Every structure is written in C-alpha cells, then in structure tokens.
Amino acid sequence: MAHIAFLGTGLLGAAFAEAAAARGDTVTAWNRTASKAQALARFGVKAAASPAEAVRGASRAHLVLRDDAVVEEVIAAARAGLSSGALLLDHTTTRPDLTAARAKRLQAEGLDYLHCPVFMGPAAARQAQGSMMVAGPRALFERVEADLAKMTARLEYLGERADLAAAHKLFGNTVIIGLVAIMADVLAIARSSGVDSQAAIDRLRTLDLNAMVARRGVAMAKGDFTPSFELAMARKDVGLMLETAEGAPLATLPAIAARMDELIAAGHGDKDASALGL
C-alpha cells in the first residue's frame, strides 16, 4: 500500500485520512492545530509537527486547506520534505485564475501538481462517496487515477487546463449555496403565511429542478430568452413574495428584484424570466 500525507485535517481532510488508513495506506497528517492531526491516531494516522515532516517519504501529498493563500503557504513549508516525483493533490476550493498560475509555476519548478476539488462532506469521504474532479496534465492523472478512484464514487478528469476543476467547483457551490439561500426565503414566506415549514419544503420536493436546468439552463447558455414566463410577470410574483414576507430577513429575493428592475428598465421585460442570465 502507499505512503501518503494529508496536509489539513479539518472535517474533510480528517475523513479522507481516516478512510485512507482504513484502506491500508501508511498515512501521516499535519494540521496547523496540532490536536486535530493527533486525534487521528486512533485510526492509525501518524501526526507530524510540520508539513515537511508530513510529506517526507510520501508518494503523494493531499492538500485539504482553506484557500489559495494557505495552499501557497503550506506547499512552501512542505517543499523541503517532498520526495522526488511526489504528487501534490490539491482538494482545496480555490480561485480559478490563482489555481492556473500556481499550476504553471509549480510545473516550471519541477513539482507535480493536480487540482482535485470534491463535492462531498466528511461522511461521504469516509465511505468513498460523492464526486471528485481533476484538472492538470493527463500523464499525472493517469499515474494516480486508480488511487483517486478509491476516494470517491465518481471521478471525472476534466482535461489539462489547470483551472477547469476550480471553475466547475464554483459552479456547483454556487448552486448549493444559492439553493440554501432560496430555501431560507421560502421558509420566511411560509412563516409569514402561517404555513408549516415542513410543508413548504415538501412543496419544493415536487419541483423537477433537473428539468428546469435542462430546459431553461440550456436555453440561457445559448442566449435564447424566448418567453414562456415573461420577466415582467416574474417580477410581479417576486413582489408578491416580498410583500408576503412582511419585512422578514431575506437572503436572495431583494437582490433578485433589484436585478429584474434593472433589466426591465433596459427593455427586457417581455423576454423570458431567464433573461436574468443576460
């Protein structure tokens, strides 16, 4: 089995390290808060005092960190311990342009780096569920493909363009966070209407969101705003939502109303509501 390192053992990184140890890998982990790495000892994970110590002798180092700045800091701290040919596998959600620049620089410096963000939480990481996207040199991906496949139910190689996985991760997180915000507004309207919150959520479950993406989303991507639900009528309905919420704190609807007003003032009121994508 492999000797690997995990740099960053928050909820997700710790789950990955635990799962790798359970598969029989020799796992060393580092975290800025040492106690978080030390807590993994019961799973057979060895805690290291520094990133360089963690990666020493490892064939691959998995980064599960907060942001671009921390990724840069930890890679710099780990370099002294990296073995020749060791792979840096970065699962951090990062900015696409910074990811591309980092990949280009590391490649020029002779370091092997792939960006591998995921759509999964700790429970899914422990059970190798969820999905993982990979962007970077195909030859590097093929070296580690079998190992990454053990970490996830769905492994998708997006190509050699280094920032593609970073962009796709933001696409998905936009939807996840956006839906949470929309559901918060639905619950606000339900409370103001005296409707049971669970009943409001149950109503959302009857909507086919995949069909909406397939129909309106595809049309929006093509720039086709042929109306089936006019923007002006949609704005009227948003007004009803705002009035019904009766001043309750809302996460998204006021901003949607403001953007609709801008588009209607610019002459787009007779287009489909998906003209929000203009």
Image: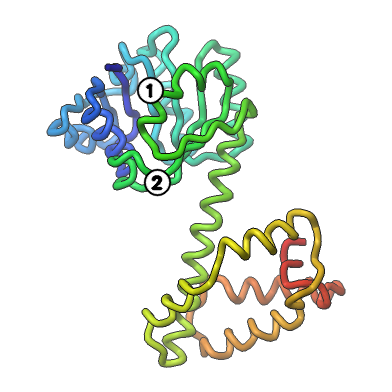
Q: CA distance from mark 2 to mark 1?
A: 19 Å
Q: Of the residues tagged 2 and 1, which is closer to the observer?
A: 2
Q: Position of residue 23 (x, y in %)?
A: 24, 28
In which image quadrant can residue 61 be found? top left
Q: Residue furthest top?
A: 84
Within 10 angstroms of label 1, few (less than 14), some, or many (20 or more) residues? many
Secondary structure type for disc 2: loop
| Closest to the observer, 144 or 171 | 144
Amino acid marked by disc 2: Met
User: Which quadrant of the figure contains the C terminus?
Assistant: bottom right
Taking the spot 46% from the left edge, 81% from the top edge, the residue there is 188
Judge from the rendering whether residue 115 lies leftward or rightward of residue 108; answer left or right: left
User: Which quadrant of the figure contains the N terminus?
Assistant: top left
Q: Position of residue 33 (x, y in %)?
A: 26, 37
Taking the spot 83% from the left edge, 72% from the top edge, the residue there is 268
Q: Residue furthest right?
A: 267
Pointer 2 residue? 120
Pointer 1 residue? 61
Relative vertical location of residue 2 with respect to residue 119 in this rendering, above or below? above
Within 10 angstroms of label 2, few (less than 14), some, or many (20 or more) residues? some
In which image quadrant can residue 232 be found? bottom right
Q: Note whether residue 97 is visible.
A: yes
Q: Position of residue 63 (x, y in %)?
A: 40, 30
Relative vertical location of residue 16 with respect to residue 187 in this rendering, above or below? above
Secondary structure type for disc 1: strand
